[in-house]
Amino acid sequence: MKTYKNLVFLMMASTLLLALGCSKEGPAGKNGIDGNANVISSPWYSPTSWTLDGGEWYFDIDDNAINQDIVESGVILAYVSLPNDTYSKAVRQLPAYALGCNWDYMIPYYGRIEFVSDAQIKPGTSNYYFRYILIPANHFLKSTAGNNSMAEILRNMSYSDVCKKYNIPE
């Protein structure tokens, strides 16, 4: 009987320690809030062809990671690198205006991203590169810094800074 009481006491003490030692916040770092846990970065895509629809050119990419949670609660950042872009050698965040036309992306439905352009003539395929980064919703995105949401801050960061923040190879 004494062993049974000791076992019950040990289990209650362990449960209490676990309950007091847990928190909803993770530590900062590789697997914590400032790390890249659950952040998905696509490879760079170069279109093999463009399709004209309603005055806009587009090409699409299917990816199951572009799910309801990401689209409705997370952040999707999309980027383009274009040949002969005189703005800079850097990557532009979409939407952007370059080479005399607008470049953007849209999510027509879960699981697909479309990169679009309103170019007057069909955009090229050589040296046209597109990429996206999917950041799921969590406490970090819901918090605010001043009057700006973290999602808005991420959208205003440079491509290089976003990659550094989430340890994404450029």
Image (cartoon, rainbow, N blue to C red):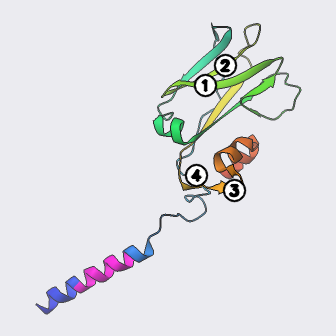
Q: As drawn, which residue projects farthest toward the right? A: 86
Residue at 21% x, 83% y: name it.
Answer: 8
Q: What separation in Å lies between label 4 and label 3 (alpha carbons)?
A: 10 Å
Q: Which residue is mark 4?
A: 142
Asked if residue 25 can be seen in this view, the reply is yes
Which secondary structure class fits the magenta region best? helix
Q: Which residue is mark 2?
A: 116
Please, what is the three-letter code of the amino acid marked with disc 2?
Val
Say what secondary structure mark 3 lies in.
Answer: strand
Determine whether 117 is above or below 25 in the image. Answer: above
Q: Earlier in the sequence, mark 3 or mark 1?
A: 1
Task: Give whichever of discs 2 and 4 has the lower sequence position.
Answer: 2
Mark-to-mark CA distance, 1 and 4: 23 Å
Foreground residue among 90 and 135: 135
Query: Is residue 138 rendered to the left or right of residue 80?
Result: left
- Name the residue located 32 percent from the left edge and 79 percent from the top edge: 14
Range covered by the magenta-colored residues: 9-18
Q: Which residue is mark 1?
A: 106
Farthest residue, direction bottom? 2
Amino acid at circle 1: Met
Tell me if mark 1 has few (under 14), some (14-19) or many (20+) residues whose alpha carbon lies within 10 angstroms of its own: some
**Residue 76 in picture, x, y percent from top left:** 60, 37
